[in-house]
Image (cartoon, rainbow, N blue to C red):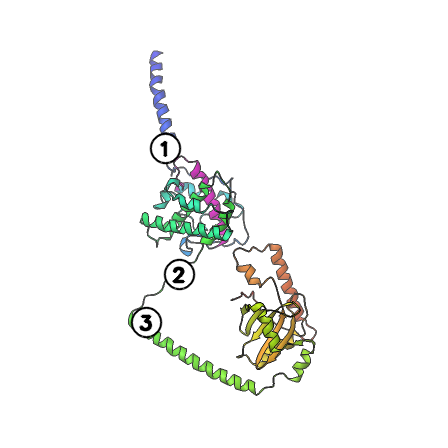
């Protein structure tokens, strides 16, 4: 009996020591042998978004941040999960082991096209590179402070300061750790460690975290295309050929313009048929057009195209209009043709032609003004989100307008140049 108790007294402290060492070891480093994903996605769950079919991204294709909104959404979810893990782990390690990371696609079962593999995040695990072994304490705390100013200033100012701080810290980190900047994977891992550290720094204070998430896509700036180094002889030859081509193009253009002007001078300004068509339109004088465009001593250009440039104007009645100045290189047929077509068109989804001006070989068309801008401004701006209901309404309105033109009572009108035109001004 005593002998057994003696053995128990010897074994219990030893067993306790072993358990203690195992417990400490379990939290000191990410366990590469544990295949289960330890990331907790409940605090920031994944929410699927549309348009995520055939997702396939690689780290070499994006400058530190995913190009597509689908993978941007995935990286934000992972960053929150890694931040919670690092904040609760006594060791403070930012990344988890390789086998755990490869099994962390659980929250994406509703959208199987999106995963660690399809977004190119396979190497975001502990031990994949120098930055993958960082702890939260290793990251510059100034980045967290710079990204905590949302709400105290405008979103654009706060986002600009935050992204600048992240990029500056990233460059310093790559330099201090002697990371090869051409290594896209290592660079991306270092950036993710900075993003995770900012989110972890806001764990006890969630104020501004949503703004920070919405600011992250601003990091997706395309890199400059690498130029090809040429020797001096090849460069001189290419320069000579280019100058010759420019000179020939200029000569041909000059000859073409002279011929067009000569042909245009032989034509009457407006034939009787067009004048009859324009009987329902107001004919503005050049002085009226100038006063409308320069109202308030501010000349606002709304955009330009192949046929001319469009300015914002205001009539004496206070009505805001869009005034299109036809380029002189265009023939009179372009001007009269547009008048003849648009003077017969009246539809709620097509801009209305209000009047025209032709004086001293200068040609202007006066349209109703669309205060909400063109469609491309809403489609391409990052800070504007069109709901699906609004997108469907836009498509239906465009379809109604095209149907009206194609079935016009005076003959079918084919546009041939439908596009969401982006303003160049």
Q: List x then y, in percent, for residue 106.
A: 49, 42
Q: Is residue 72 magenta?
A: yes
Q: Are marks 3 and 2 in contact (CB under 8 Å)?
A: no
Numbered range of the magenta stretch: 68-97
Q: Exactly how many numbered labels are in the figure? A: 3
Which circle's residue, 1 or 3, is located before the other in the chain? 1
Kindly identify which numbered label has been placed on residue 302.
none
Q: On the picture, is 174 further left or further right than 348? A: left
Query: What residue is disc 2 on?
Result: 224
Quadrant showing the N terminus: top left
Q: Secondary structure at mark 1?
A: helix
Mark 3 burial class by Cα count in 10 Å: few <14, some 14-19, many 20+: few
Question: Which mark is nearer the camera, 1 or 3?
Answer: 3
**Furthest-bottom residue in view?**
266
- Report the residue at 65% width, 72% height from top: 354
Which circle's residue, 2 or 1, is located before the other in the chain? 1
Kindly identify which numbered label has been placed on residue 25.
1
Q: Is residue 216 magenta?
A: no
Q: On the picture, is 145 further left or further right than 233? A: right
Q: Are marks 2 and 1 in contact (CB under 8 Å)?
A: no
Q: Viewer-proximal residue, 404 or 297?
A: 297
Does residue 23 show up? yes
Which circle's residue, 3 or 2, is located before the other in the chain? 2
Query: What residue is disc 3 on?
Result: 235
The quarter of the displayed image where residue 243 is located = bottom left
């Amino acid at each position: 009996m005593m002998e057994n108790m003696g053995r128990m007294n010897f074994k219990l402290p030893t067993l306790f020591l072993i358990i203690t060492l195992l417990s400490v070891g379990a939290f000191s480093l990410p366990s590469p042998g544990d295949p289960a994903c330890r990331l907790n996605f409940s605090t920031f769950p994944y929410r699927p978004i549309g348009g995520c079919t055939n997702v396939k991204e690689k780290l070499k294709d994006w400058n530190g941040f995913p190009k597509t909104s689908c993978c941007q959404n995935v990286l934000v979810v992972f960053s929150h999960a890694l931040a919670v893990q690092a904040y609760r782990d006594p060791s403070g390690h930012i990344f988890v082991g390789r086998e755990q990371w490869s099994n962390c696609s659980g929250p994406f079962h509703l959208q199987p096209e999106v995963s660690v593999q399809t977004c190119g995040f396979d190497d975001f695990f502990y031990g994949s590179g120098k930055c993958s072994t960082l702890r939260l304490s290793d990251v510059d705390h100034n980045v967290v402070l710079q990204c905590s100013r949302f709400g105290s200033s405008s979103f654009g100012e706060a986002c600009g300061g935050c992204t600048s701080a992240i990029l500056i810290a990233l460059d310093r980190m790559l330099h201090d750790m002697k990371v090869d900047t051409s290594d896209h994977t290592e660079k991306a891992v270092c950036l993710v460690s900075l993003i995770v550290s900012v989110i972890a720094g806001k764990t006890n204070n969630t104020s501004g975290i949503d703004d920070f998430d919405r600011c992250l896509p601003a990091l997706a700036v395309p890199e400059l295309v690498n130029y090809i180094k040429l020797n001096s002889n090849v460069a001189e030859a290419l320069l000579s050929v280019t100058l010759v081509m420019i000179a020939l193009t200029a000569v041909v253009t000059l000859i073409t313009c002279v011929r067009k002007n000569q042909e245009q001078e032989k034509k009457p300004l407006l034939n009787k048929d067009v004048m009859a068509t324009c009987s329902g339109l107001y004919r503005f004088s050049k002085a009226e057009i100038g006063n409308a465009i320069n109202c308030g001593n501010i000349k606002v250009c709304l955009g330009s195209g192949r046929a001319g440039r469009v300015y914002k104007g205001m009539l004496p009645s206070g009505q805001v209009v869009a005034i299109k100045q036809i380029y002189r290189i265009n023939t009179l047929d372009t001007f009269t043709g547009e008048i003849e077509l648009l003077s017969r068109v009246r539809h709620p989804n097509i801009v209305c032609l209000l009047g025209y001006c032709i004086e001293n070989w200068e040609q202007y068309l006066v349209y109703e003004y669309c205060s909400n801008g063109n469609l491309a401004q809403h489609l391409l701006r990052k800070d504007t989100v069109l709901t699906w209901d609004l997108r469907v309404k836009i498509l239906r309105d465009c379809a109604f307008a095209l149907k009206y033109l194609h079935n016009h009572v005076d003959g079918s009108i084919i546009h041939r140049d439908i596009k969401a035109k982006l303003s160049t001004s």
